[in-house]
Amino acid sequence: LPRAVIFDLDGVVVDTAHLHFMAWQRLAQRIGIPIDAAFNEQLKGVSRQESLLKILAAGGKSGTFTQAECDAMAAEKNADYVGLLAGLTTADILPGISELLHTLREEGVLTGLASVSQNAPQVLRALGLAQAFDYVADTRRITHSKPHPEIFLNVCEALNIAPQHAAGIEDAQAGIDALRAGGIFSIGIGATLEGANHRLDSTEGLSWAVIRQQWLRHQA
Ligand code: BG6
Ligand code: MG
């Protein structure tokens, strides 16, 4: 059985993925680039700077803006996003997650958080989950965005668990790709994900029993 379970934050632990999308959509709209929910799938799990570059590329505006202008746009998106986070409470934790974290502690399974969001510590505090994980990745020490496996491997290392003894939960295609690249058992949350070891439509169906069952099925 897995000795550690590593969680993504936005879209797995908390329902904030749509807030990132809303803030990006407003910024993109302002600079004349319409983006839709299908395109947003490419932004999930991707860092702020890289997300902006993807949006500019999609709108045929790569290289149009100076670095200072790009920094200002990223800051504008973040200020909008942080504003949307106001009022975030424990009620915004996605279904099944609190119970799962609780069960993992009881069972002695380690927990990690692998989010590239610089807002992760603040979001965890708002949710009352600042102490809920054995290790939270420090984005300042991560140089590659998902789909690079760095952040997941960093969490495994900090927990002192080999990647093949860990399971990861992700709602982003980039996240599933990162888990696969790192040799970590993957559980995908969302309809469009490809390549996950197991896929669920929402966190509602997620539990230690399901993770265990799927893990054993894949060992067989
Ligand atoms: C990821 C989100 O968790 O964090 C992305 O899936 C987001 O949508 C990224 O762009 C970076 O977040 P932040 O808060 O540092 O801008
Ligand atoms: Mg996510």
Image (tube, rainbow, N blue to C red):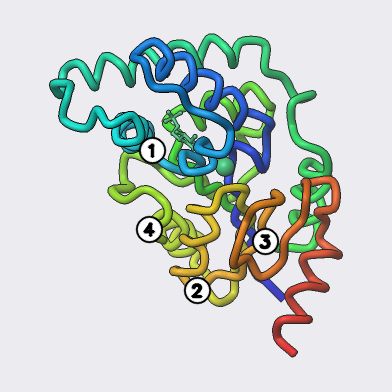
- The span from disc 1 to disc 4 (Cα, nearest Å) is 12 Å
Please tell me which of labels 3 and 4 falls first in the chain.
4
- The span from disc 3 to disc 4 (Cα, nearest Å) is 17 Å
Please tell me which of labels 2 and 4 falls first in the chain.
4
**Tags 1 and 2 touching, CB below 8 Å:** no
Please tell me which of labels 1 and 4 falls first in the chain.
1
Kindly identify the residue that appears in the image at 70 percent across and 49 percent down.
Answer: 190
Q: Quadrant of residue 217 in the image?
A: bottom right
**Residue 9 x %, y %:** 59, 40
Q: Which mark is residue 47?
A: 1
- The span from disc 3 to disc 2 (Cα, nearest Å) is 13 Å
Q: Quadrant of residue 105 in the image?
A: bottom right
**Front in this rendered view, residue 59 or 18:** 59
> Does dot 3 land on a helix, a strand or a loop?
strand
Please tell me which of labels 1 and 2 falls first in the chain.
1
Figure check: 120 above or below 175 = above
Q: Dividing the image into 4 quarters, which one contains the N terminus?
A: bottom right
Q: Residues within 10 Å of mark 4 (few under 14, many from 20)?
A: some
Q: Which mark is residue 148?
A: 4
Please tell me which of labels 3 and 1 falls first in the chain.
1
> Does dot 1 land on a helix, a strand or a loop?
loop
Figure check: 22 above or below 213 = above
- The residue beneath circle 2 is 183
Q: Which mark is residue 187?
A: 3
**For the view shown, which residue lies furthest in the bottom direction?**
220
**Front in this rendered view, residue 2 or 73:** 73
Q: Residues within 10 Å of mark 1 (few under 14, many from 20)?
A: some
